[in-house]
Amino acid sequence: MQETGRSELWVADPENGLDLETYPIPAPKELAAGWHEYVDDKAALMPAPGVDGVLAVPDIPFANIKAIASVDLCETMRHTGLALRTVEEWPPKTAAELDCFQHYAEGLFVRNNAQVVQTLMNQDLVQPVDGIDEIAAILRGWREHDVYTFANTSTLPGCELATLRFLGKYAAGGFQGIVFPRNHEGNLPLTKGIVARNVAELFGSSLRAAVHIDDLSVHNVKFREAMQELPDVTTATFQPVWPSCLPLDSASVQRATPLETFQAADEFLHRYIDN
């Protein structure tokens, strides 16, 4: 990586969006091994339906699962945007100094964000959001109350194992699986919503509720659309306002911070899992 001026960061191979030679996409067996190494070494695993990913067999019979929770990771649990901005200006600012990450280092740019993010994630330089310990406790609480919780992320190819390391370090015991729709903008056929519905269908008629937490409105919209095919499942979506400060989805529940967003989702789920 070579700095060419105060307003530009040059990254090798700017014509290509991803460096899959340095950061290859793990094969299914590698992904399963990564789950066992970083997240849960005792979990029995099953294929993720119709998508790259890994799911743990629930601790309880499938018919006893009461709800699912589908969770985006970037800007809800980890500061991917903020990490990217730290390479654009020196000295870097902290989260507390920013209104939201889009307005960070205005006028500066990175020619190839994808490779920068790949590098940051794989070097474990993406930090968790404030309140990550409390968020992890909420996730573990869901599991204890028969909620099947999985990460539903469009993180860049080549960042999968780094993402598993993040989950093992900051949310140990919170997740029972992870899926990679690889549809960041939500404009491809396989949406986060369809993936979540496919997971929900594993648990049959016992399912009472389903939630999705995401900072990007399109994914919340697509989740609600897909879940309409399960009319007996009550569905809700939740959206943190900060740190993304993206356009808001009027049909989602919004809260100011990621932690407050998880707390709102927790309150919703307990209406359906406490009886």
Image: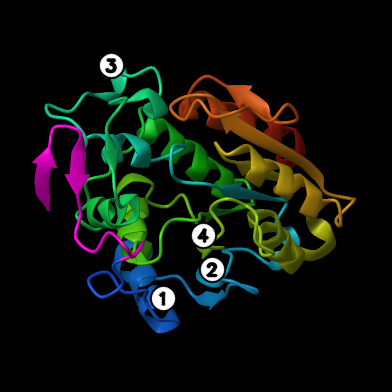
Q: Does residue 237 appear anywhere in the picture?
A: yes
Q: In which quarter of the image is residue 36?
A: bottom left
Left or right of residue 24: residue 137: right
The residue positioned 25% from the left and 75% from the top of the image is 21
Q: How far apart are marks 2 and 1 (CA)?
A: 9 Å
- Asked if residue 103 is positioned above or below residue 271 in the image, the reply reads above
Residue 267 within the segment the image draws in magenta: no
Residue 3 within the segment the image draws in magenta: yes
Residue at the disc numbered 1: 32
Furthest residue to the right? Answer: 231
The residue positioned 49% from the left and 75% from the top of the image is 44
Residue at the disc numbered 2: 55
Name the spot of residue 201 as percent of width and height, x first: 76, 65
Q: Which of 7 and 38 is in front in this view?
A: 7
Asked whether disc 2 touches disc 4, contact meaning CB atoms under 8 Å apart, the reply is yes
Q: How far apart are marks 3 and 4 (CA)?
A: 34 Å
Q: Nearer the viewer, residue 165 or 190?
A: 190
Residue at the disc numbered 3: 97
